[in-house]
Amino acid sequence: MDTERPIPELALRIVDLVTGMMNEIRPRLVQAALTGQRAENANLRHQDNFLSDHDLWMHGRYKDLLAEVMPSFIYASEEADPQVIGSAEHPDLCVLVDPLDTSELAVRALHGYTHIMIYSRSRKRPVLAVVGDIFHHVRLYVAGCDENGDDHAFTVTADGKWHPLNRPSNARLSQALVTNYLMRPDERFKPLADQQRFFDALSEPGSNGKKKGRIGVDFGSVSLCHVAAGFTDATVEFAKGFAVWDLAPGHYILHAAGGVTIDLEGHPITLDYGLNSMPEINKTMNTRRRFIAAGNQPLAEEILRTIRPTSSTPS
């Protein structure tokens, strides 16, 4: 246990591992951007998603490096079927990995993220998560469970400084910066543009007559990490839904920082992600969740009241 940061030693080792991975992949991605050689690969698992050789390299590299840190675990990556690593027949820990999130932007050197979450099947909850930001000074978002069962969240900047995350936003909707993964025109942008009540509430002027509400774009787990850090006030997904590798790591970090994540019926999203047996893991890896993540409960509820359900159904 690190006495300055009350998170398990394993979390610090995973932080070092993710940092090393980002240092390895960053120059490759910059080179891809500058040359236009983006190494696109056929995506047989998710046909609508961009897949590069860099995603596949990181998938294999993570598996090898994690095996040096952890004697046995279930490796559940976006890029392949879950598998047991090590000699244990039924290891307790399940490692959920998205090796390279927003890879179609990463190969343009614009945005690139990497997610790891370690889930205890006996405790039915995460014990640590690390979300790495490959191109920005705010480099890592980390959450871990201490020996007393308490969760703690931090962000780590590129100069190695750790900053506790425990003061997410207390803004109301008319003052908020709310983000959404709106890049796909048909699947995500059109459903967002159709939320007129939400936009009316976001555009409500304050007592001084100024309109402070804003909508922004964000990506995967890091969008919930930005809420955890107080950089944004909320993030919403009410169209296609997020896969577990995009939602769960950031959800746990936001939970540890004191924020809230609810479904579109207003129920809190539990930390039990359904990674408790191999059949459950396989099912969970093929489902999506719609959600509202916010720095405070009143903001989450205020957003929920403005959302009109879409016809799109998560699969």
Image (cartoon, helix red, strand yellow):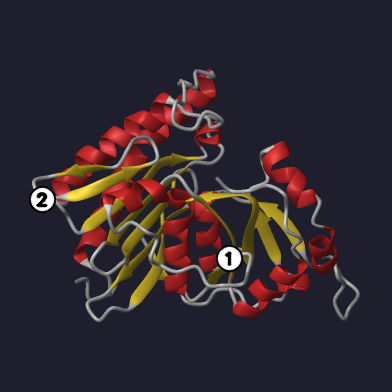
Which class describes the residues within 10 Å of circle 1: few (<14), some (14-19), or many (20+)?
some
Where is residue 138 shown, x and y percent of the image? 47, 55
Mark 2: amino acid: Ala
Res 58 visible: yes
Res. 216 image quadrant: bottom right
Of residues 138 and 303, which is closer to you in this image?
A: 303
Where is residue 25 shown, x and y percent of the image? 37, 34
Of residues 296 and 277, which is closer to you in this image?
A: 277
Res. 86 image quadrant: top left
Q: CA distance from mark 2 to mark 1?
A: 35 Å
Mark 1: amino acid: Asp
Where is residue 246 shown, x and y percent of the image? 48, 50
Where is residue 50 shown, x and y percent of the image? 52, 30
Q: Residue furthest front?
A: 279
Give the vertical position of 86 relative to 223 (above or below).
above
Res 159 visible: no
Which class describes the residues within 10 Å of circle 2: few (<14), some (14-19), or many (20+)?
few
Q: Residue at x 19, y 59 (%)?
A: 92
Would residue 244 be found to the left or right of residue 76 on screen? right
Of residues 95 and 276, which is closer to you in this image?
A: 276
Q: Residue at x 35, y 59 (%)?
A: 129
Q: Residue furthest right?
A: 209
Q: Which residue is mark 1?
A: 263
Q: Which residue is mark 2?
A: 88
